[in-house]
Amino acid sequence: MEQPRDLTVEAPRAWDRPVVTVPVLACLSLVGGQLPSFSAQANLWTLGTGGALIWLGLGNRVPRRPAPVRLGRGAVWWVLPVAVFGVLEGATFALSAGDEFPTFSRLADPFLEDELVRSAAWFGWLAAFWGLVRR
Amino acid sequence: MMRAIAIAGFLTALLLLAVLEWLARRPGSRVPSLAEVCAYVMRYEVGPVPVGRIGVFGFWWWLGWHFLAR
């Protein structure tokens, strides 16, 4: 009898373990962290790694964790930080006051100029992306 | 003054995210984790099209491009 997909658990694949994925993501992040802003290489690396993860995530090539069928009322709390961030980002973007009233991107730029911080940001982005692909 | 408000506001939003995630990971919590919220949104489909997955992936892709390539 066919089982609903959410109830089935696939056997883990040899490469689908943190001991494999973390070093791979770390290597990709170190390369990404070396690429300067606004360069063609940085654009291609972002589009390439993101595109590959989307390709994996939209197919059935990677086993997925079961998703909740419904969320409890506590989920409404997540609207709060999103709203605070969204209103502030919208206001700073609309006013375009530069460093007087900066957007989040403008505040983050000086930190992301450092290669180590940039690599760490790359790792966070890719690790979260990988987490989404497996959901 | 306005700069301080912006910095404080963004830090508040990030702090709220961290507190909510911490609350969500406590045993018996009624608040779902951010990963569970994302997984729920990603379930949304219109016919055979996984609109939720495409939307979340697209947003995350754009975010990475915005901060890491520009």
Image (cartoon, helix red, strand yellow):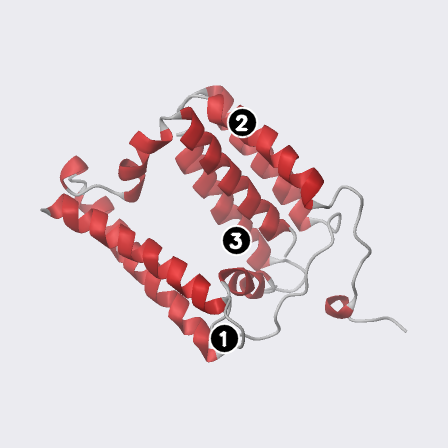
Q: Position of residue B51 (x, y in %)?
A: 57, 58
Disc 1 and disc 2 in contact, CB within 8 angstroms: no
Residue B35 appears at what percent x and percent y? 54, 60
Residue beneath disc 1: B29
Does residue B60 appear left or right of residue A101 in this picture? right
B54 w.r.t. A38: above or below = below
Callout 1: SS: loop
Label 2 element class: helix
Residue depicted at 56% across the width and 59% down the height: B52
Quadrant that contains the N terminus of chain A:
bottom right
Q: Amino acid at mark 2?
A: Leu
Question: Mark 1: few, some, or many residues within 10 Å (few <14, many ≥20)?
Answer: few
The residues bearing labels 3 and 2 have C-alpha atoms spaced at a distance of 25 Å
Q: Nearer the viewer, mark 3 or mark 2?
A: 2
Judged left or right of residue A78, residue A127 is right
The first of marks 3 and 1 along the sequence is: 1
Residue picked out by circle 2: A30
Asked if labels 3 and 2 share a chain, the reply is no
Residue at 44%, 76% (x, y): give it.
A74
Residue B13, how many percent across, how many down?
Answer: 31, 57
Chain of the residue displaying label 3: B
The kind of residue tagged 3 is Val
Callout 3 touching callout 1 (CB < 8 Å): no
Q: Secondary structure at mark 3?
A: helix
The answer to whether B48 is drawn above or below residue B30 in the figure is above
Q: Report which quarter residue A113 is drawn in.
A: top left
Report which residue position mark 3 lands on. B56
Is there any visible trace of residue B58 in the rendered image? yes
